[in-house]
Image (cartoon, rainbow, N blue to C red):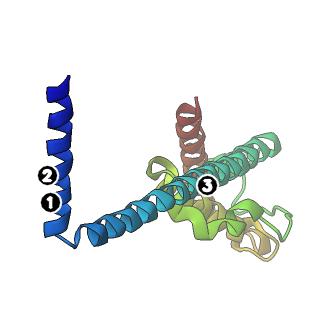
Amino acid sequence: MPEESFGSIRFLNTIKITMDTNPMIPVYTAFGGIVLGAVVSIIPAFVQDHLRRKLEIRAVTSAIVTEIKVTLLLMEKRQYVQNVERILSNLRSGQIRSATFQVVMSDERCPIYKSQISKIGLLPPKIRDDIVTFYQLLESAICDVKPGGLLASAPHGEAEFAHLYDIGTEMIRVGQKIVNAYSSTVK
């Protein structure tokens, strides 16, 4: 037991000698404490910001996908594409030579997409490009059928209706792809 005590005393003396020979050790210790304290204080803020951003991305994605679902549902219930297909069929069969097609709609279209457009870059890459494509196709179709639009203002033939039909069917395909991709990532 006395040998252990002498060993401890020798160890303490070695530390004392080291501290006596290097007066910068307290400075290094203080600096290390400052750096460690700074790093430890940054980590919770970083984690909190990361979690907040993740929740915001999820909320924006969910809201936009829901708006797309509702748009597709309304298109289906109102049978817009089927009506254009019927007109196109009548034009191709020669039953009619030209037609008009008008859809009265609110001036406030796609409110969620428009309010979140600055956050599109944050959306999951799997659906981000398709979301932009969907809304561009939707706006193109709307320009043709709204009051004063190309197909609403004057009678047109097969080419214009075929173009609208292609836009509508592609928009539905892209919209369903978005909804399916989002549904598979949420589960």
Three-letter code, disc 1: Ile
Three-letter code, disc 2: Thr
Write down the residue under mark 1. 17
Contact, mark 3 vs mark 2 (Cβ under 8 Å)? no
Q: Residue at 38% of width from left, 63% of height from top? A: 33
The N terminus lies in quadrant? top left
- Between residues 81 and 108, which one lies in front from this camera angle? 108
- Measured along the vertical axis of the image, is residue 99 above or below residue 70? below
Residue 180 in the figure: left or right of residue 143 = left
Q: Residue at 56% of width from left, 44% of height from top? A: 178
Residue 160 in the figure: left or right of residue 70 = left
Disc 1: CA contacts within 10 A as few (<14), some (14-19) or many (>=20): few
Image mark for residue 52 = 3
Write down the residue under mark 2. 14
Mark 3 vs mark 2, CA separation in Å: 51 Å
Q: Nearer the viewer, mark 3 or mark 2?
A: 2
Residue 2: quarter of image: top left
- Between residues 120 and 131, which one lies in front from this camera angle? 120
Three-letter code, disc 3: Arg
Residue 121 appears in the rendering: yes
